[in-house]
Every structure is written in C-alpha cells, then in structure tokens.
Image (tube, rainbow, N blue to C red):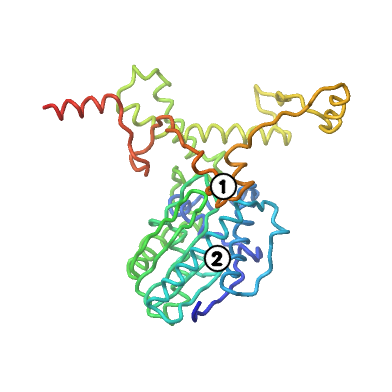
Amino acid sequence: MGKHKVNCSKGTREAGLDHAVLSASSSHRWLHCPPSIRLSEKYEDMTSSYAAEGTDAHELCEHRLKELLSLPTENPVDSLSYYSEEMEECANSYATYILELVESAKANCFDPIILIEQRVDFSAYVPDGFGTADCIIISDGVLKVVDYKHGMGVEVSAEENPQMMCYAIGALELFDGIYDIDRISMTIYQPRRDNISNYEVTKSELLKWATEVLQPSAELAFAGEGEFQYGDWCGFCKAKHECRKRAEANMALAKYDFELPPTLSDEDIEEILGMVDGLTSWASDIKDYALARAISGKKWNGYKLVEGRSNRKYINEKSVADAVTVIGYDPYEKKLLGITAMQKLLGKSRFDEVLSTYIEKPKGKPALALASDKRKEINTVANDFATERNEEN
C-alpha cells in the first residue's frame, strides 16, 4: 500500500463517557434555534432502534477500515444487535472508499495522515464543543473529513453542513500548526441512499464562518438565550411535542379554515404546501406524546385510554402445522422472496450478477416535491402539448 501514518482515537461514540451540550450532530438545530438546547435538558434522553443500528454500523465500519489498513482490530460482529448482510456490504464499501481516498492523497503526498474515530475539539468557538470524526485524512495542503451515515430516511448533504464544519474546525485546531493546510474537503458517505456528497472550502472561509456564524449562535445556545425558531431542525428536538413556537407555526394553517382548494388562491395553496408536511409531523408527535403520557397515568379531559384493535395470531406455529398435517392438509404456502429479502439472501454482488436482467423499476407515482429536489421534473400532458404547439409555430 505504500507509506502512510495512521492514528486511532477512542472517540465519544465509542467511549460513551461524556456528552457535549452543544454537540456537532445537533448543531443544525442550535444554530437556528439556540434556546432549544437548554429547554431540552429537562427531558429524558430517548434512544431509538435507528440510532442503535447506526452505532452498530459505525463500529463495523471502523473494524473493516482497520482491517483494510492492516491495523490491530477485534471483530465486533458477535456483539452487534443489528448486524446484517446489508450492514456488512455498507461497511466494506465505506472502507474501500476511504482506501481510495488514501491512495488518491498519495499522488500528491508521500505519507498522508489517516485518523480513525478521531476526537476533535472545537471549543475555541463552541463552549465545551467536541465530537468524533469518523475519518480524517491529511495530505499536502488538504484536510479531508469523512462522515458515515447509515440512515436511509433522509439524504444528507455535505454542503454547508454544520456538523461537518464543526469537525473540520476541530481537526484544523489539532493539525493546522503542524501541516500547512489551506483547503478543507468534507464528505458525507451514505451508502443506503447511494449518496456521496462533497463540499470544499478554503481555510479562511471556514474560519470566517466559525467566527461570524458558529461562535455567536453557540454562545447564545450555551446560555439558553436567543429566539426560538421553527423549521426542519425540530425533528430531533426533545421538546418538539410541547414547543409553543412549533405549535404556533403549524396552527397558522388554521387561518385557512381548511377550506376546499377551489376557494383558495394559488398563492394560498403554495403557502399551505410548504407547511403541510410539518403540520402532519407535528400532529403525529402530539398524538404520540399524549398517548405516552396517558400510559404513564395522565388523564386528558375528554379522552380515555382504551385497548386498540389487534389481529388473531397463532400461539405456537409448529403445533398448528403439526395439527393440520395430521388431518391430511398442507399448512404451508410457497412464496417467492421479495427483492429486498432476496438481495439479503444472495448478497448484493451475487444478486446483481444472477438477477439483474430480471429486475425492473417501474415509474413512480407523480408526487409534488420542492423545486430544490434532485429528482428530474416529469412532463405533464399539458406541458407536452405546449411543447408541440411551440415546435409547430
């Protein structure tokens, strides 16, 4: 592989011993809504299966990368609760991608520095600010930060991503005095969305953002000051169920009295479209919160806790199968595995090799999306007709 230097640091994700009040991962929220951080402190930390799966995936990624770099490592697979063939493929593809970056760095640098799960400190701009960068690569003049994302619900962009910029600032604090760094490259690697997003800034641009944007908001957030603001950053806020600012923003739709579209102007509909996703998410959060409180003993006026509907199920499937077989019937049905299950069975490469010619992806149903959405706009009958008329003229 050639010469390179590797450092492995036990970061906060792995150690789990301390927690930053203003973490890099929550920076999108506290930059926009500074007081939400202190407000959230009165709520218990809630973990999810998605977060636990992501933690497992990061452990596997670290292991596979160390393997590829011939570094000492212990296989964590037996201790991973969410291990799967898909997670294995994602970890291997991540490790391979990092190795490609290292080989590319060697074209301009004899001995690039590689840091895995590196703790970084950006407290020069954020009070007690620190975090863990998945991978940092330093070569002549270039600092590259890579963050692995296992989630597939939302495609994450590296462009002006504050989490990545915080990591980059922390890395710069560590190594700028040792290496002559003038460019910073940030990459989100999100294999389950086929997403590799890159963003590059100069050192001066990054430090300008840190001084003019990051530091003032961080100081407000740490002090619990500033203005509450509603936006897409509310999704992971622990106070989202009771936040009045979020309620006010969603209740603003009530001014339309939910009239039928023909009574609304185009401008009204456009305004509603921009708010309706947040409204439905907020309403769902309120229902979930009210239910959780009711289960804990809270009595809501006009409501009661009841048993929901359920479906019949077998107590013991083997006993059922045996009983039906005894009276002369076959209790089983034979069914082809679905595409996702089949891919897990065969593995992605084998699946592509054997079944690619038998797979098609039909066109999806038309859906309204923001103009900034990456998907290509589809033509409507009206648009096609207008195009034909223009060509004729």
Amino acid type of the residue that numbered disc 1 sits on in the rendered structure: Phe
Q: Which mark is residue 236?
A: none
Secondary structure, mark 2, is: strand
The disc, 2 or 1, on the residue closer to the chain's N-terminal end is: 2
**Height in image: 185 above or below 381?**
below
- Residue 323 locus on image (x, y percent): 87, 26
The total number of labels drawn is 2
Q: Name the residue rendered at 65%, 21% in the picture.
A: 302
| Residue under pointer 1 | 351
Identify the element where label 1 is drawn: helix
Residue at 34% of width from left, 30% of height from top? 270
To which residue does mark 2 refer?
132
Whole-percent x, y for residue 197 in the image: 41, 56
Q: Position of residue 269 (x, y in %)?
A: 35, 27
In the rendering, at what x and y percent does residue 257 appear? Answer: 42, 21
Q: CA distance from mark 2 to mark 1?
A: 35 Å
Residue at 63% from the left image edge and 33% from the top image edge: 290
> Residue flagged by tag 2: what amino acid is it?
Thr
Asked if residue 128 lies left or right of residue 159, the reply is right
Is residue 236 placed above or below 158 in the rendered structure? above
